[in-house]
Amino acid sequence: MAADHSHSNVSHDSQGDAAAREHTHPDWGTYKWVALILAAITALEVWIYYIPSFTATKLFVPVLLALSAIKFTIVVMFYMHLKYDAKLFRALFVAPLVLASFIIVGLLFLFGHLKVSF
Amino acid sequence: MATAAIDTHDTHAGHPPTSTGLNNTKVAIWAFIGSECFFFASLISTYLIYRGRSLVGPFPHEAWTDPATGHVYKAILNIPVTSVSTFVLLMSSLAMVLAHSAVVRGDRKSSKIWLASTALLGATFLAFQAYEFTSFVHEGLTIHTNLFGSSFFILTGFHGAHVTAGVIWLLTLLFIDMKRGLTPDEAINVDVCALYWHFVDVVWIAIFTLVYLIK
Amino acid sequence: MATTVSLPLPAAHTSHKYESGLWSWLATTDHKRIGQLYLYTSLFWFLVGGIEAGIIRMQLYGPNGHVVTAQTYNELFTMHGTTMIFLVIMPLSAAFFNYLIPLQIGARDVAFPRLNAFSYWVFLFGGLFINASWFFHAAPNGGWFGYAPLTTRPYSPGLNIDFWVIGLQILGISSLAAGFNFITTIINMRAPGMHFMRMPIFSWMAFITQFLIILAFPIITVALTFLMLDRFFGTNFYEVSAGADPLLWQHLFWLFGHPEVYILILPAFGLVSEVLPVFSRKPLFGYPVMVYSGILIAFLGFGVWAHHMFAVGMGPIADSFFAITTMLIAIPTGVKIFNWLGTMWGGSLRFTTAMKFAIGLVALFTIGGISGVMHSSPPSDLQQTDSYFIVAHFHYVLFGGSMMGLFAGLYMFYPKITGRLMSEKIGNWHFWLTAIGMNLTFFPMHFLGLDGMPRRISSYDAGQGWEQNNHLASYGALLIVIGTIFFAYNWFSSMKSGKVAGNDPWGGATLEWTIPSPPPDYNFAVIPKVTSRYPLWDRKSPRLSADVPHGSEPEGLAEIALAGQKVGSVQVPSDTKLNAADAHPTASALGIVMPTPTIRPFVAAFALGSVFIGLIMHKNLPIMLVAAVVFVLSLYSWLLTPLEPEHH
């Protein structure tokens, strides 16, 4: 968001970043496929939601979680181009994500939503 | 002034290039996104903790009869409608990458079309949310009603607020693009907006599954 | 790649409208000025928090004290805790982050100078907001940890908790913004050759602290938002009658609260790690381990939170898990203590005031750590929790730890900030009065706790065996007060009559000591190239840094670049010669473009704060709306204005 080409808020790519992206940027084809896969998985999720015999099984929740994890991952990898970008960005995102996931699981256990038996 | 190939800014007059070669704003937005993971994780955790613990209905996935009045409240979540809005938001992410790609290429016509499309799709999502919220209130679910009402509206409400901020951001970029054009070496600004936008989409993916689909 | 010298371009000029006076402070974007603003504001709040503690100690001196009512007492201990944590230790650390990080890493400023200013003004607003409550006779009174459901509207109907909740939200915004700023700064603005394992240890600890901040503060933001929504809009997050869980607040709060205590201690650890090597004339022992242990502490710090909740009945599995993680976290912490001892061992020690305070932290934090480990066992903690044993523990780690470390930093860096040295003689009085006073105040509290004295009681009956230790604690507080007076006197009188410091009064090792005291606005005339962890020792006292890893690139050679293209190279004198005390070229003379001062961050901060004023005024929508609009407009104005003046 800026009115002109001066420093800092109209940020300019330093050469390294621009060059790297020119070589490894996904193209329209990849983006289209990603969009199609996202739509397909969403459709699949909604479809299985309406199968009562499946929703009653123990598999329902893990399958849904897995499907949404796939959607999550491909948006992050391709649209947010984490796959092609500097490793630093991956660290800045994945570390909090992993830590937050552990904390959610811990809280679910502490509030009795997950049972652990020894 | 500067073309994409030669960046005359960073080594000028005492401005060394960045230590990593990465843009400052981009580093900051990724740090911000990491922080937002914890923000939404706290909201989602609370929703999940309170799942099934509301003392009165309406409930998300099952009908409920109010013992006091005899009124029957149906399961309040509308999966078909929300599936459509989810699809809309996912497509807005596609429009967003195309917008960024257009700005990088210097394609002035496409950049405006795709920026506008992203904002429009985002606004459509918000319209669906508004419809959903008002119909829930009509059907007897407010933030005051029970734990589900409080945690649901606040979780999805904060998400919607993030989408709103994103739409405003997009419209601002669109306005600048229309007024004087966004040049390729300013693509970083669209990139940063895009990262924010996709993250908000990704949070919705989690919410859609955890709130709407998992019973 | 060696140092880069940029030739001034003919058209370069900067016009600083605001170079002196009040306006120059309101519109500053200079990290050194912002650091000083944080410094003086937090020292002021230190006095306020100290007075609150003083009144507490007067009330508790003997049995059945009647200095204050029970209601006022609740406000005093709540505000004392809130003030010391959020308005003293955190902003004092922020003063160092601001002042020191760019100097240590060889940068001219932080990544986002206006955001930096914004953080300060929001902090100032938040501190004033929460303390304005005193004038409404409605100071926060629910403890610094504000447990719900006690703090929900039904049980705390007045404005007290509203001030607390909103005040903390405001302060959280300040910390978060600064967190993103410093993370970007440290990642992206280090001098050439300064890869991460050559970075000064304070900057490392500061870096880790920023991650703790940006991850922990969102959690308390959510917890506070829930409480705000419950209190102002009738939601049910903490409403037990609607089925809410009384433990939700506690878990969310401590998920923040435990990383928060590492936010409070790591910067002080960093400062001590700077002080000890310089005054031992020896490199820091085990620098890599110090870095890794800091990272490990931060990471593990997210896994111990429920040790604050051993008495709520979480069950044996949860209790055991958190007991084990808490014991584990003592390991990287303990490692640091040994490394500090190793730094001093065999060194030629100079017992300056800074050094004394640093050694003070090593000793006193250890005591605090020992009591901490005692709490880590749930059975022991069942007796200790909510007793004065805990009060003893956290004062040892926060006063004996954080404050001592911060004082060490203040004494070490005062010359850099002001250009003069503080009196060592008066500093000696400050140190001993504080050290003895602190121990006299808090050591007896261990016994009070073991003897069953609960926390947060405004008075106690005679005959329980508590009088003697309470007397001692109150006398100790008096000594601390006297010591603080010595400190205040030293601070202000040295500014006028202290010995002139020069660039490097202590024989420092790192980049901040290569530039004048106080530094020019651009910090470094020439961005240095770094080949080891101790660049100044490399130049001045190479024997001292001989054993640390060194790069093999030659120093002292500079490329000449014109508009980004290398056009030649030249031998460049080091900064110490270039920037002699009498030869202070201006930024524009050197062709250095500095950010323009601007009032926009101040306006944005004030507008944002006004939204919250509207909220506490019984949800005054007109005020909130107007303030929000002004905020958004000021943001647009800020973001659409270039940081620096046009120069081509």
Image (cartoon, rainbow, N blue to C red):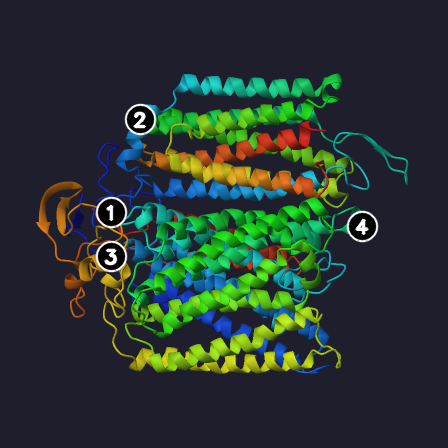
Label 1: chain?
C
Q: CA distance from mark 1 to mark 2?
A: 26 Å
Q: Quadrant of residue B212?
A: top right
Residue placed under numbered mark 4 in the picture: C241
The amino acid type, in three-letter code, at marker 1 is: Pro
The chain containing the residue under callout 4 comes to: C
Q: Which residue is mark 2?
A: A22
> Could you say which is closer to the camera, residue B54 or residue B154?
B54
Q: Of the residues tagged 2 and 3, which is closer to the observer?
A: 3
Vertical arrangement, residue C6 with respect to residue C65, above or below: above
In-front residue for pair C291/C232: C291
Mark 1 crowd level (few <14, some 14–19, many ≥20, 10 Å Cα): many
Q: Is residue C551 left or right of residue C273?
A: left
| Amino acid type of the residue that numbered disc 4 sits on in the rendered structure | Ser
Secondary structure of residue under mark 4: helix
Q: Position of residue C259 (x, y in %)?
A: 54, 53
Whether residue A39 is visible to the viewer of this picture, yes or no, is yes
Gap between marks 2 and 3 measured at Cα: 43 Å
Residue at the disc numbered 3: C545
Marks 4 and 3 belong to one chain: yes
Where, by quadrant of the figure, is residue C139 drawn?
Answer: bottom right
